[in-house]
Amino acid sequence: MRYSIFSLLSEALRGNTGWQPAWRDPEPKASYDAIIVGGGGHGLSTAYYLAKEHGLTNVAVVEKGYLGSGNVGRNTTIIRSNYLLPGNIPFYEHSLKLWEGLEQDINYNAMVSQRGVLHLFESDGTRDAAARRGNAMRLEGVDAELLDREGVRRLAPMLDFDSARFPVMGGLWQPRGGTVRHDAVAWGYARAADRRGVDLIQNCEVTGIRVENGRVLGVETTRGFIGAPKVGLACAGNSSRVAAMAGLQLPIESHVLQAFVSEGVKPLVDQVIIFGAGHFYISQSDKGGLVFGGDIDRYNSYAQRGNLPVIHEVMEAAVALMPSVSRLRVLRQWGGIMDMSMDGSPIIDKTPIAGLYINCGWCIGGFKATPASGWCFAHTIARDEPHRLNAAYRLDRFATGDLIDEAGTGATPNLH
Ligand SMILES: Cc1cc2nc3c(=O)[nH]c(=O)nc-3n(C[C@H](O)[C@H](O)[C@H](O)COP(=O)(O)OP(=O)(O)OC[C@H]3O[C@@H](n4cnc5c(N)ncnc54)[C@H](O)[C@@H]3O)c2cc1C
């Protein structure tokens, strides 16, 4: 069923009795041409682009819970391409371009909102780093503008500019960044993949990966064995556990990241604001709630909930940046499991096992990558070689030393 103003009108006239389920609920077949493990944003977008770009439609997405139950439905919805390093900028810019045409492409309102991302700096050192990043972006044709204090004040007058500890000196502004409604991304890609013939199999946990003579044969699941000559893993926080089923040890640690939503207030934060001095970012949802988050909880865990010390830290940063929010009530808080790589950059690659492909290492920033990640992973799976956009995201770079250390902190996931 195609969504349009006409379908809305005709359903309004007949009492909304004609809407069809957004996707089918098929039984798993005995085998497919390709299986994607993980029905998050990356798995679903991979399946969609496999069908759309490569004509591979005999594909299943196998998800242990329900579609979108992982990080794609838990994040703070920020999209941007303000990266510094050559491996990252073109990839994330490709993603931003795909976001810009996504709703028309998948015929789904994902509420893509290019309200701009403002990354603040509060010292001479961070100003220089922001200028360098902005220059790197512009050299790659990405929009970036260095704002001084007054430039920031015009965009975000509610910030505390005179804080003795963290006086706002300016910011790096990316007008094309913004937010996208996270769960609508999962639903939109799911529906679009289903329309092209992909089977979306929920409540089906992968419990083993069958490998023979160095080649993948399929996956063992709670609903039986499903065969496929190609299997792509897109399991985010559970990547290490699933890859271990094929005997692979990944350079990934799993950590909790929390998000928070306040009670609704009138429009206050028009952009996405990232506070450089503390690890803190904030935007406002269309319902009026302030949506914000901070750093990871800094201990390894698979529990999708967080702990008090980071809550304390995040609230402290919120009030330091915008004292006016100090009396707001936080209504909701939750956590997701982040697949933290050892250099802060992702992995989209083949593995040493023929037919087995890996997509992981998204750290705290994989939502913005959802379209490009699926697009590149689909290319890698269909052609059995990486696209030039993900050529740097190799699994063996941790052995060869070709790291993409965006944060400049080395193998310290807790600092990314
Ligand atoms: C609180 C929070 C805030 C964030 N904010 C942002 C942000 O503002 N911007 C941004 O760019 N990124 C953000 N992120 C990161 C982003 O959400 C993730 O990097 C991204 O969603 C990960 O990819 P995914 O959507 O495929 O993951 P997921 O949605 O987690 O998908 C992985 C799926 O694999 C399934 N799975 C796992 N094991 C198995 C198995 N054995 N069998 C079958 N299925 C399995 C899981 O159930 C899950 O559904 C945030 C994350 C969190 C938690």
Image (tube, rainbow, N blue to C red):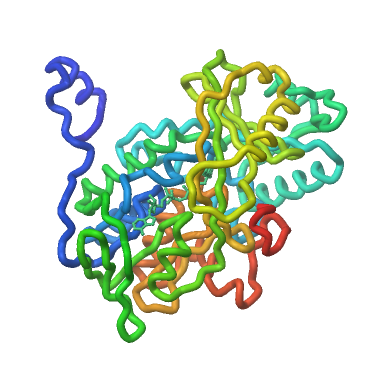
Q: Is residue 324 left or right of residue 304?
A: right
Between 43 and 338, the residue placed more toward the observer is 338
Location of residue 130 (image quadrant): top right
Q: Residue at x 42, y 72 (%)?
A: 385
Residue displayed at 77% across by 23% down: 160
Q: Quadrant of the N terminus?
A: top left
Residue nearest the viewer, comparing 384 with 281: 281
Q: Does residue 243 sit above or below 291 in this rendering?
A: below
Q: Position of residue 342 (x, y in %)?
A: 62, 63
In this rendering, position of residue 224 left or right of residue 351:
left
- Look at 23% across and 38% down and name the residue there: 22
- Is residue 75 visible in the rendered image? The answer is yes
Residue 347 on image: x %, y %: 51, 63
Q: Position of residue 276 (x, y in %)?
A: 73, 39
* Residue 287, placed above or below residue 295: above
**Which quadrant would residue 208 be assigned to in this image?**
bottom left
Camera sees residue 274: no
Residue at the farthest front position: 308
Residue 85, horizontal then vertical, whole percent: 66, 57
Q: Residue at x 58, y 20 (%)?
A: 329
From the viewer's side, name the closer residue of 252 and 95. Answer: 252
| 387 with respect to 124 (left or right) | left
Q: Quadrant of residue 231?
A: bottom left
- Total marks shown come to 0
